[in-house]
Image (cartoon, rainbow, N blue to C red):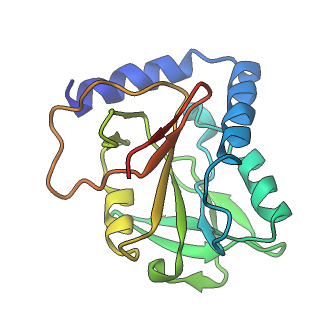
Amino acid sequence: MLKKDLRTLYLNKRLQYSTQSLQSKSLIISNNILELPIWSYTNYHIFLPIDTKNEIDTSYILSILHGKDKNVIIPKMFTSNSLENYLLTDNTTLKKNKWGVPEPIDGIKIEPSSIDVVFVPLLAFDKKGNRVGYGKGYYDNFLNNCKPDVLKIGLSLFEAEEQITDVYENDIPIDYCVTPKKTYIFK
């Protein structure tokens, strides 16, 4: 299936979820993440959800990361389709941008090369670890600047598609994808 078709299909499917169902599935995904072999690292990048798009509630994962004394890094988006990354601290002030993404106003900037694990937002993914996002390339650009062995973990409410037919050369696949029912391993 083509990315544009998957984007439309899965955004519509996600918008069908009630708040209660979304919270329940987000909690299950967070608990499933505990089973991954990723907890020996220090610096974890995580997205904060766009509420209006029914994205997975990452607050549960944030609680796990804080409970394990990990450094949590969150993105700030720029019109050049790039991300800057900031350490999330007790003093971090968040503000929603024009797309509804909560992001830091300022703070301690972290270079992509320092990040060990990235929780990657997505709308859909396939059985080879290819992903479909919103189509602007923010995460492909960002992941391209991370160290080669950074762990990329997709979070999805839905199971894998058989194949994304229009994967591009510069698309960066994920290493894992965690859903409420299953954890996919691609590396």
Q: Which of 79 and 128 is in front in this view?
A: 128
Q: In the displayed structure, would residue 6 be above or below residue 62? A: above
Residue 156 appears at what percent x and percent y? 52, 34
Identified at 62% across, 28% down, the residue is 180
Quadrant in the rendering for residue 6: top left
Q: Position of residue 160 (x, y in %)?
A: 40, 28
Q: Where is residue 115 in the image (x, y as percent from the top left)?
A: 53, 75
Residue 123 position by quadrant: top left
18 lies left or right of 83: right
Q: Quadrant of residue 147?
A: bottom left
Pick the quarter of the image with the N terminus: top left
Q: Residue 114's spot in the image, x, y percent?
A: 52, 82
Q: How many marks?
A: 0
> Vertically, is 78 above or below 177?
below
Residue located 67% across and 39% down the image: 32
Q: In this view, does 143 lie above or below 155?
A: below
Which residue is painted at 34% across and 30% down in the image? Answer: 7
Q: Nearer the viewer, residue 108 or 119?
A: 119
**x 39%, y 51%: residue:** 174
